[in-house]
Amino acid sequence: MVRLAIPNKGRIAAPIMDLMEKSGLHLPDMSERRLITRTLDPHVEILFARPIDIPEYVATGAADLGITGHDMVAERESDVRELLDLQFGKAKLVLAVREDSGITSPQQLKGAKIATEFPVIARNYFARHRVPVNIVIVGGACEATPHLGIADAIVDLSSSGTTLKTNRLVVIDEVMETSTHLIANHTSLLVKKEKVDEICCALESVVRARGQCYLMMNVLRSSLECVKNVLPGLSGPTVMDVASTEDLVAVHAVVNEERVYALINALKRAGARDILVMSIQRMIR
Protein backbone atom coordinates (compact mmCIF):
# COMPACT_ATOMS: atom_id res chain seq x y z
CA MET A 1 0.00 0.00 0.00
CA VAL A 2 1.24 3.47 -0.93
CA ARG A 3 -0.24 6.41 0.98
CA LEU A 4 -0.38 9.76 -0.83
CA ALA A 5 -1.00 12.89 1.26
CA ILE A 6 -2.81 15.76 -0.45
CA PRO A 7 -4.23 19.08 0.84
CA ASN A 8 -7.67 19.03 2.42
CA LYS A 9 -8.17 22.71 1.55
CA GLY A 10 -6.37 25.78 0.25
CA ARG A 11 -5.55 27.32 -3.12
CA ILE A 12 -4.00 24.17 -4.61
CA ALA A 13 -6.57 21.65 -3.31
CA ALA A 14 -8.96 21.87 -6.31
CA PRO A 15 -6.23 21.59 -9.00
CA ILE A 16 -4.80 18.57 -7.16
CA MET A 17 -8.19 16.83 -7.11
CA ASP A 18 -8.45 17.46 -10.87
CA LEU A 19 -4.95 16.03 -11.29
CA MET A 20 -5.97 12.91 -9.35
CA GLU A 21 -8.93 12.29 -11.63
CA LYS A 22 -7.03 12.88 -14.88
CA SER A 23 -4.15 10.65 -13.78
CA GLY A 24 -6.53 7.73 -13.19
CA LEU A 25 -6.28 7.79 -9.39
CA HIS A 26 -10.03 8.25 -9.12
CA LEU A 27 -11.43 8.88 -5.67
CA PRO A 28 -14.85 7.63 -4.55
CA ASP A 29 -17.77 9.94 -3.77
CA MET A 30 -16.30 12.72 -1.66
CA SER A 31 -19.56 13.96 -0.13
CA GLU A 32 -18.38 12.39 3.13
CA ARG A 33 -14.68 13.12 3.06
CA ARG A 34 -12.64 11.02 5.42
CA LEU A 35 -9.12 11.56 6.71
CA ILE A 36 -7.96 8.50 4.76
CA THR A 37 -9.74 7.14 1.70
CA ARG A 38 -9.03 4.54 -0.97
CA THR A 39 -8.68 5.14 -4.70
CA LEU A 40 -9.74 2.86 -7.54
CA ASP A 41 -6.23 1.43 -7.32
CA PRO A 42 -6.44 -1.01 -4.38
CA HIS A 43 -2.78 -0.34 -3.58
CA VAL A 44 -3.06 3.47 -3.29
CA GLU A 45 -4.84 5.41 -0.55
CA ILE A 46 -5.20 9.15 0.02
CA LEU A 47 -4.49 11.00 3.25
CA PHE A 48 -6.06 14.45 3.50
CA ALA A 49 -3.98 16.92 5.50
CA ARG A 50 -3.09 20.57 5.85
CA PRO A 51 -0.55 21.61 3.17
CA ILE A 52 1.92 22.74 5.84
CA ASP A 53 1.78 19.33 7.58
CA ILE A 54 2.30 17.20 4.47
CA PRO A 55 6.13 17.53 4.32
CA GLU A 56 6.48 16.17 7.86
CA TYR A 57 3.98 13.36 7.25
CA VAL A 58 6.11 12.29 4.29
CA ALA A 59 9.43 12.79 6.08
CA THR A 60 8.37 10.62 9.04
CA GLY A 61 6.81 7.91 6.87
CA ALA A 62 3.19 8.55 7.88
CA ALA A 63 2.74 9.02 4.11
CA ASP A 64 4.91 7.63 1.33
CA LEU A 65 4.19 10.48 -1.08
CA GLY A 66 2.75 13.96 -0.79
CA ILE A 67 1.62 16.84 -2.95
CA THR A 68 2.19 20.30 -1.55
CA GLY A 69 3.92 23.58 -2.26
CA HIS A 70 7.70 23.83 -2.45
CA ASP A 71 7.35 26.70 0.03
CA MET A 72 5.80 24.31 2.56
CA VAL A 73 8.74 21.92 2.21
CA ALA A 74 11.17 24.80 2.71
CA GLU A 75 9.25 26.15 5.70
CA ARG A 76 9.21 22.78 7.44
CA GLU A 77 12.82 22.03 6.40
CA SER A 78 11.64 18.45 5.94
CA ASP A 79 13.98 15.70 4.78
CA VAL A 80 12.04 14.57 1.70
CA ARG A 81 12.77 14.05 -1.98
CA GLU A 82 11.05 16.41 -4.42
CA LEU A 83 10.23 14.14 -7.36
CA LEU A 84 8.18 16.25 -9.73
CA ASP A 85 7.22 19.87 -10.29
CA LEU A 86 3.51 19.72 -11.13
CA GLN A 87 3.71 23.23 -12.60
CA PHE A 88 0.69 24.84 -10.99
CA GLY A 89 0.15 26.89 -7.87
CA LYS A 90 3.06 29.05 -8.99
CA ALA A 91 3.83 32.05 -6.83
CA LYS A 92 6.69 34.07 -5.41
CA LEU A 93 7.53 34.64 -1.78
CA VAL A 94 8.45 38.30 -1.66
CA LEU A 95 9.73 40.92 0.73
CA ALA A 96 7.45 43.96 0.57
CA VAL A 97 7.21 47.32 2.32
CA ARG A 98 4.86 50.30 2.29
CA GLU A 99 5.06 52.38 -0.87
CA ASP A 100 5.86 55.48 1.18
CA SER A 101 8.48 53.84 3.41
CA GLY A 102 11.50 54.87 1.33
CA ILE A 103 12.98 51.38 1.86
CA THR A 104 14.54 49.85 -1.25
CA SER A 105 16.73 47.01 0.03
CA PRO A 106 16.70 44.38 2.81
CA GLN A 107 19.81 45.93 4.36
CA GLN A 108 17.67 48.94 5.37
CA LEU A 109 15.52 46.69 7.55
CA LYS A 110 18.13 46.10 10.27
CA GLY A 111 16.24 45.69 13.57
CA ALA A 112 12.87 45.95 11.81
CA LYS A 113 9.74 43.90 12.47
CA ILE A 114 8.88 41.44 9.69
CA ALA A 115 5.38 39.95 9.56
CA THR A 116 5.02 36.57 7.88
CA GLU A 117 3.33 33.17 7.83
CA PHE A 118 6.74 31.71 6.91
CA PRO A 119 9.02 32.40 9.91
CA VAL A 120 11.64 29.75 9.01
CA ILE A 121 12.03 30.93 5.42
CA ALA A 122 12.08 34.57 6.55
CA ARG A 123 14.74 33.95 9.23
CA ASN A 124 16.92 32.03 6.78
CA TYR A 125 16.55 34.77 4.18
CA PHE A 126 17.64 37.57 6.53
CA ALA A 127 20.42 35.38 7.96
CA ARG A 128 21.85 34.99 4.44
CA HIS A 129 21.78 38.77 4.09
CA ARG A 130 23.26 39.19 7.62
CA VAL A 131 20.43 41.51 8.59
CA PRO A 132 19.10 41.04 12.15
CA VAL A 133 15.31 41.42 12.30
CA ASN A 134 12.40 40.58 14.57
CA ILE A 135 9.98 38.05 13.08
CA VAL A 136 6.27 38.59 13.80
CA ILE A 137 4.27 35.43 13.04
CA VAL A 138 0.79 36.10 11.66
CA GLY A 139 -1.89 33.69 10.52
CA GLY A 140 -3.35 35.78 7.70
CA ALA A 141 -3.99 39.28 6.37
CA CYS A 142 -0.25 39.83 6.31
CA GLU A 143 -0.63 42.76 3.90
CA ALA A 144 -2.38 44.87 6.54
CA THR A 145 0.35 44.67 9.18
CA PRO A 146 2.60 47.49 7.90
CA HIS A 147 -0.38 49.88 7.97
CA LEU A 148 -1.37 48.80 11.48
CA GLY A 149 2.06 49.42 12.95
CA ILE A 150 2.55 45.71 13.61
CA ALA A 151 5.43 45.35 11.16
CA ASP A 152 7.79 47.36 8.98
CA ALA A 153 7.77 44.82 6.16
CA ILE A 154 6.23 41.49 5.20
CA VAL A 155 7.40 38.24 3.67
CA ASP A 156 4.39 36.79 1.88
CA LEU A 157 3.23 34.85 -1.18
CA SER A 158 2.30 36.82 -4.27
CA SER A 159 0.90 35.40 -7.51
CA SER A 160 0.00 38.49 -9.54
CA GLY A 161 1.01 41.35 -7.27
CA THR A 162 -2.55 42.72 -7.27
CA THR A 163 -3.13 42.25 -3.54
CA LEU A 164 0.13 44.00 -2.69
CA LYS A 165 -0.70 46.91 -4.96
CA THR A 166 -4.20 47.19 -3.49
CA ASN A 167 -2.66 47.44 -0.03
CA ARG A 168 -0.12 50.05 -1.19
CA LEU A 169 2.86 47.75 -0.78
CA VAL A 170 5.88 47.44 -3.06
CA VAL A 171 8.22 44.46 -3.52
CA ILE A 172 11.87 45.17 -2.74
CA ASP A 173 13.19 41.62 -3.13
CA GLU A 174 12.17 38.12 -4.17
CA VAL A 175 12.76 35.56 -1.43
CA MET A 176 11.95 32.40 -3.42
CA GLU A 177 9.77 30.95 -6.15
CA THR A 178 7.36 28.15 -5.42
CA SER A 179 4.98 25.76 -7.16
CA THR A 180 3.23 22.49 -6.35
CA HIS A 181 5.51 19.45 -6.06
CA LEU A 182 5.21 15.70 -5.64
CA ILE A 183 7.44 14.72 -2.72
CA ALA A 184 8.53 11.32 -1.44
CA ASN A 185 9.80 9.59 1.68
CA HIS A 186 13.38 8.38 1.16
CA THR A 187 12.69 4.85 2.43
CA SER A 188 9.52 4.52 0.36
CA LEU A 189 11.52 5.36 -2.75
CA LEU A 190 13.51 2.18 -2.16
CA VAL A 191 10.99 -0.19 -0.59
CA LYS A 192 8.01 0.76 -2.76
CA LYS A 193 9.89 1.89 -5.86
CA GLU A 194 7.71 0.18 -8.46
CA LYS A 195 4.44 1.65 -7.19
CA VAL A 196 5.98 5.07 -6.53
CA ASP A 197 7.35 5.15 -10.08
CA GLU A 198 3.91 4.17 -11.40
CA ILE A 199 2.19 7.03 -9.55
CA CYS A 200 4.88 9.51 -10.57
CA CYS A 201 4.51 8.46 -14.23
CA ALA A 202 0.72 8.87 -14.05
CA LEU A 203 0.96 12.38 -12.61
CA GLU A 204 3.75 13.41 -14.97
CA SER A 205 1.70 12.26 -17.98
CA VAL A 206 -1.04 14.74 -17.03
CA VAL A 207 1.51 17.53 -16.61
CA ARG A 208 2.99 16.76 -20.04
CA ALA A 209 -0.45 16.81 -21.68
CA ARG A 210 -1.38 20.18 -20.21
CA GLY A 211 -1.61 22.81 -22.94
CA GLN A 212 -1.31 20.26 -25.75
CA CYS A 213 -3.91 19.04 -28.23
CA TYR A 214 -4.11 16.35 -30.88
CA LEU A 215 -4.64 17.23 -34.55
CA MET A 216 -5.86 14.74 -37.14
CA MET A 217 -6.41 15.54 -40.82
CA ASN A 218 -6.55 14.07 -44.30
CA VAL A 219 -4.11 15.32 -46.92
CA LEU A 220 -3.57 14.57 -50.60
CA ARG A 221 -0.19 12.90 -50.90
CA SER A 222 0.84 15.60 -53.37
CA SER A 223 0.28 18.23 -50.64
CA LEU A 224 1.96 16.30 -47.81
CA GLU A 225 5.25 18.19 -47.81
CA CYS A 226 3.45 21.55 -47.75
CA VAL A 227 1.42 20.42 -44.73
CA LYS A 228 4.48 19.06 -42.92
CA ASN A 229 6.25 22.39 -43.40
CA VAL A 230 3.57 24.27 -41.43
CA LEU A 231 2.81 21.57 -38.87
CA PRO A 232 4.90 21.58 -35.68
CA GLY A 233 4.93 18.53 -33.47
CA LEU A 234 6.71 16.92 -30.58
CA SER A 235 8.45 14.35 -32.77
CA GLY A 236 7.15 15.27 -36.19
CA PRO A 237 3.76 14.25 -37.58
CA THR A 238 2.60 10.66 -37.98
CA VAL A 239 1.59 9.84 -41.56
CA MET A 240 -0.63 6.86 -42.50
CA ASP A 241 -2.28 5.69 -45.70
CA VAL A 242 -6.06 6.15 -46.00
CA ALA A 243 -8.32 3.55 -47.64
CA SER A 244 -9.77 5.92 -50.24
CA THR A 245 -10.22 6.24 -53.99
CA GLU A 246 -8.20 9.43 -53.68
CA ASP A 247 -4.48 9.36 -52.96
CA LEU A 248 -4.96 10.47 -49.33
CA VAL A 249 -2.85 10.15 -46.21
CA ALA A 250 -3.89 10.74 -42.60
CA VAL A 251 -1.65 13.09 -40.68
CA HIS A 252 -1.64 13.16 -36.87
CA ALA A 253 0.36 15.51 -34.64
CA VAL A 254 0.51 16.84 -31.09
CA VAL A 255 0.74 20.64 -30.98
CA ASN A 256 0.53 23.41 -28.43
CA GLU A 257 -3.09 24.49 -28.11
CA GLU A 258 -2.08 28.16 -28.26
CA ARG A 259 -1.00 27.60 -31.88
CA VAL A 260 -4.13 25.80 -33.07
CA TYR A 261 -6.11 28.93 -33.96
CA ALA A 262 -3.48 30.16 -36.41
CA LEU A 263 -2.57 26.66 -37.61
CA ILE A 264 -6.01 25.67 -38.89
CA ASN A 265 -6.12 28.18 -41.72
CA ALA A 266 -2.45 27.59 -42.56
CA LEU A 267 -3.12 23.84 -42.80
CA LYS A 268 -6.17 24.36 -44.99
CA ARG A 269 -4.16 26.57 -47.34
CA ALA A 270 -1.46 23.88 -47.47
CA GLY A 271 -4.00 21.26 -48.54
CA ALA A 272 -5.28 19.68 -45.31
CA ARG A 273 -8.96 18.82 -44.91
CA ASP A 274 -11.26 16.93 -42.50
CA ILE A 275 -9.30 18.47 -39.63
CA LEU A 276 -10.11 17.27 -36.12
CA VAL A 277 -8.85 18.90 -32.91
CA MET A 278 -8.99 16.85 -29.71
CA SER A 279 -7.88 17.47 -26.14
CA ILE A 280 -5.23 15.23 -24.56
CA GLN A 281 -5.70 13.90 -21.05
CA ARG A 282 -2.37 12.13 -20.59
CA MET A 283 0.86 11.99 -22.56
CA ILE A 284 3.53 9.40 -21.75
CA ARG A 285 6.99 9.34 -23.27
Image (cartoon, rainbow, N blue to C red):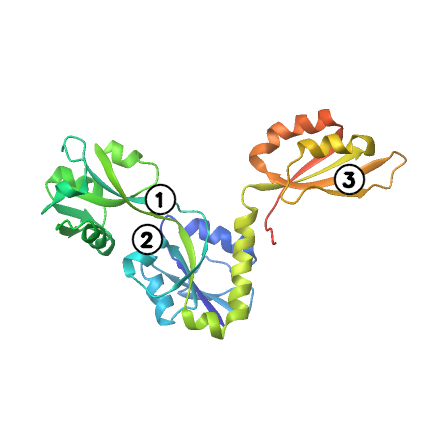
Q: Residue visible at 90% across and 35% down? A: 245
How many neighbours does mark 3 have within 10 angstroms: few (below 14), some (14-19), or many (20 or more)? Answer: many
User: How far apart are the alpha carbons under marks 3 and 1?
Assistant: 42 Å
Quadrant hosting residue 216: top right
Q: Residue visible at 25% across and 32% down? A: 166
For the C terminus, the quadrant is bottom right
Identify the secondary structure beneath mark 1: strand
Q: Earlier in the sequence, mark 3 or mark 2?
A: 2
Name the residue tied to disc 2.
Answer: 71
Relative vertical location of residue 141 with respect to residue 191 in this rendering, above or below: above
Name the residue tied to disc 1.
Answer: 91
**Residue type pointed to by label 3:** Ala
Residue found at the far bottom of this picture? 191
Q: Earlier in the sequence, mark 2 or mark 1?
A: 2
Name the residue tied to disc 3.
Answer: 250
User: How far apart are the alpha carbons under marks 3 and 2?
Assistant: 47 Å
Relative vertical location of residue 135 with respect to residue 54 in this rendering, above or below: above
Answer left or right for 207 relative to 10: right
Answer left or right for 72 relative to 25: left
Q: Nearer the viewer, residue 104 or 43?
A: 104
Q: Residue visible at 50% across and 58% down? A: 29
